[in-house]
Image (cartoon, rainbow, N blue to C red):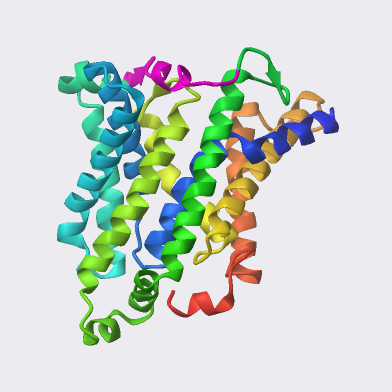
Amino acid sequence: MDFGFILSSALGELFSPTTAAYALAALGLAVHFGYSGLLNFGQAGFMAVGAYGFAISTLSFDAPFFLALLIAVLCSVIFAFILGIPTLRLRADYLAIVTIAAAEIVRYVVTTNQLTSVTGSANGLAAFEGTFYSMNPFPEGSYMGMNNRDFFIRVVGWGLVIVCCVLVWLLMRSPWGRVLKGIREDENAVRSLGKNVYAYKMQALIIGGVLGALAGMIFTLPRGAVQPSNYGTELTFFLWTCLLLGGMATVLGPVIGAMIFWVVLSLTQSLLYGLIESGVVTWLTTVQAGQLRYILVGVALMLLMIFRPQGVFGNKKELAFA
């Protein structure tokens, strides 16, 4: 078993496009729950809306990249309004139920056979990434062991993560962000000061949803395909894991949490596969090992919640509202 290769493969996940997508989506959850107290379990729905909005506008309407990007963002805003108007007055636990149901509705809608010509049904959509890679400024060659396409998507993905982190940091330091934190702590007190709590919650839902839509695009561009099976409820739970690992009401917490999540996931998978191939472990198949890694990550998360519930970068004061 080559431990050097296993370790280098795991560390390679630190700056992968998938990790960048998870970091963006988890940052959106931080805006929703960490700063606003909105218990959103439908972030996978926002990612699906962004990915399908981009893919459909490119394939069906031959939209250029930036127009397709704008359409994807607008679709996430519309989805946030549809989701938020009837639900933002609900209690946190009811909001969680509604949002997880809404994400599943999105996934089932795009798999409808009557929409096959538009959404591709269960097979999804493919070959829509050409407009993105046509803007690649890097010539053919090797860049830090990657080809120019892989390097370009990493630069764009992590550049977007940095920009969004700075914007969220500035927003949360503004008077608007302080009102959000007040709503998280005690919305009745904020309402008594004459603030429109409902409007602030809607704005937070929209901003976090837009981050989720951007994450959905970054998540699907390296694959060159968008498939509904990738946007199930387990995706939202993985994003919550990233958020809890790093810290709920922090800007860097979701980013570091996404990095830790994917490194640990890759490391446990490679170690288990290596033990099986070398004959050290004979009571597991590779399929079982793939499921066992999620169990191990779950156990690690449970231990984290016991010994450091505020996350790696969190503060215990943040738990007062939870």
Would you say 184 lies left or right of 102 here?
A: right
Would you say 220 lies left or right of 312 here?
A: left
- Residue 187 in which image quadrant: bottom left
Relative to 192, residue 79 above or below: above
Percent coordinates x, y for residue 127 in the rendering = 39, 14
Q: Is residue 76 magenta?
A: no
Q: Is residue 238 visible to us here?
A: no
Front residue of this view, candidates 116 and 190: 190
Q: Is residue 119 visible to us here?
A: yes
- Residue 36 in which image quadrant: bottom left
Relative to 221, residue 147 above or below: above
Percent coordinates x, y for residue 140 in the rendering = 63, 12
The magenta region covers 123-138
Percent coordinates x, y for residue 60 in the rendering = 23, 17
Q: Tell me what residue is drawn at x 47 percent, y 21 percent.
A: 135
Q: Tell me what residue is drawn at x 34 percent, y 54 percent.
A: 207
